[in-house]
Image (tube, rainbow, N blue to C red):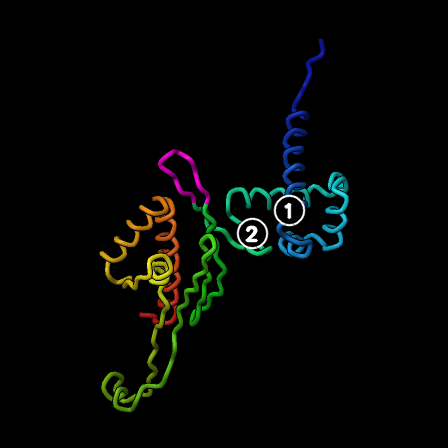
Amino acid sequence: MRQRHYSHIRISASRMNELEDARKALLLEDVNVGELANITGIPYQTIRNMRHKPELLERASWTRVETLAQLYDDLLTNKLVIVQGMFRQGIPGYNEQEDGDTERHKFWYEEDLSNSYSVVTIGIDEAYFEWSASISTEEASQADAEKYNNGKPAVIKTLRMIPFLNKVANYYYGLDISEQDPDSVKQLKDRLAGDFGEGFADKVMGINEMLNKITKKMQREEFPE
């Protein structure tokens, strides 16, 4: 008796799943054709045609199907989120409730980074927080040059930063805190955990650590030892 092989069936099933995910991405109601074309690199007219006639997706190149399917997967895993019809870089965040249910919070960010100036806009659910760090340069006075640089011309570099956690504390509780005070930071984390869940508080603190790393990188670049 001739042995039967079913490997092609498994491949077909896998591709059918990708095709379905691609179709879901194509038909997202919260984003327009231009935004889909921009993030996928698929031509505008192609996206427009496939959205109008989803059956065209079945005749599209598999690279385009995989691109759309990956986009949908990134939305499911919160690597991407949709904010006001636009795709944003997501930060996965979940909140375990006492009853065992999981509430999904939307964390996202946009960044514009350089050695001397960095700005990151962070979104948490419906709230928006802008963090920035800048390094300014000015010539030192003659007195300072004499005192610190043997009289040679010198420049003074100053780091200025808009703190993130203080904005969070002010938004949720009307408080001003110092990120240099560990007790204040811990109290904020505990309060966020009590009101929104441990996962929410951990995610906020994780974002702050990400911003601190950006600051440290700027300092290494602009203040070499």
Q: Which residues are magenta?
A: 94-104
Residue 210 in sight: yes
Q: Is residue 142 left or right of residue 104?
A: left
User: Is the residue 110 above or below the residue 160 in the image?
Assistant: above
> The N terminus is located in which quarter?
top right
Q: Is residue 82 magenta?
A: no
Which residue shows up at 50% across the image and 60% down it?
110
Q: Which residue is mark 1?
A: 28
User: Is the residue 121 above or below the residue 65 in the image?
Assistant: below
Considering every residue shown, the one lying at the far top of the view is 1
Which residue shows up at 64% across the image and 41% down it?
24
**For numbered disc 1, what is the local secondary structure?**
loop
Q: CA gap, disc 2 to disc 1? A: 10 Å
Q: Amino acid at mark 2?
A: Ile
Which picture quadrant has residue 4?
top right
Q: Is residue 181 left or right of residue 165?
A: left
> The C terminus is located in which quarter?
bottom left
Q: Amino acid at mark 1?
A: Leu
Q: Which residue is mark 2?
A: 82
For the image, the number of numbered tags is: 2
Which picture quadrant has residue 138?
bottom left
